[in-house]
Image (spheres, rainbow, N blue to C red):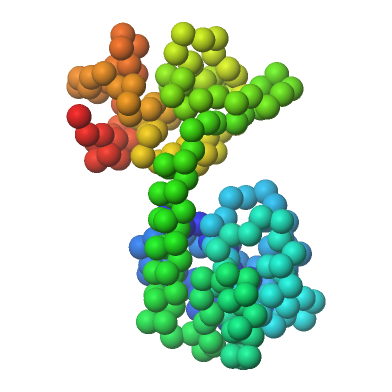
Amino acid sequence: MIHAIALDDEPLALKVIESFCASNDYIILEKTFTKPSEARDYLASNEIHLIFCDVQMPSITGINFVRELASKPMVIFTTAFSEYAAVSYELNAIDYLLKPINKARFDQAVSKANDFFLHLQSKEATSQQFLYVRAEYSLVKIPLSDIFYFETMDDYIKIHLKDKKPILTLMSMKKMLERLPKNQFVRVHRSYIVPFEKISSVRGKSLFLETQEIPIGESYKKDFFENYHV
């Protein structure tokens, strides 16, 4: 799913985007903002894939807002004025929607965003070979092939490694899963994430990594069996 936010100084425009996103299958609109400063703060501490960004706002233009972002998600600009289209494409915007936004045109724009998002995920999955985590006051580089499984330990995650000492890092399972290649790892329980390639067998409500038994949680069963292929 694409996690998105919307920034526009007009609340009515945000309501339109909210409505369109609610009827879309692959967009989750996390939050809407009328103030660029609040949107900037939210982006600094949350992983967002897409911004719907108004071009003309009182304190800053949407163009400059995007230019100033340290980490740049995908962007779909929205505005009542067509003259900014050329500049938006210089910033590699996914699309440029003219107000009042038409539903069919909106769907076309987010379809482009989804295609690009899937392309990026595919590239990451094929190129990512290592995981970097903070442990014992340093940044540790872990080859993905060394990971046996992940286990929650209160606010920490214990990374079990093949024939090596486990590594403990402060992170949620949700955040960890977001950093792993989707085609290589799966969450099978609220307390466990496992690599597909290390699964030796599945029996009943458990899977086995060699002799290590891992329970398959009821709420994770459907996703696991849809993605696990012997």
Can you see residue 154? Answer: no
Q: 34 or 178: which is nearer to us?
A: 178
Residue reaching furthest front?
A: 127
Image position of 113 with respect to 213: above or below: below
Q: Residue 88 occupies which quadrant of the picture?
A: bottom right
Q: Quadrant of residue 50?
A: bottom right
185 lies above or below 107? above
Look at the image and tell me in which quarter the N terminus lies.
bottom left
96 with respect to 138 (left or right)? left
Q: Is residue 168 above or below residue 43?
A: above
> Residue 161, image x and y in percent?
48, 16
Q: Position of residue 54 (x, y in %)?
A: 63, 78
Q: Position of residue 218 (x, y in %)?
A: 30, 32
Q: Is residue 206 left or right of residue 3?
A: left
**Camera-nearest residue between 116 and 218:** 116
Residue at 39% x, 69% y is: 111
Residue 69 percent coordinates (x, y): 71, 61
Q: Which image quarter holds the C terminus?
A: top left
Q: Is residue 228 visible?
A: yes
Q: Please tell me which residue is depicted at 52% across the width and 82% down the height of the picture.
A: 97
State which quadrant residue 200 falls in.
top left
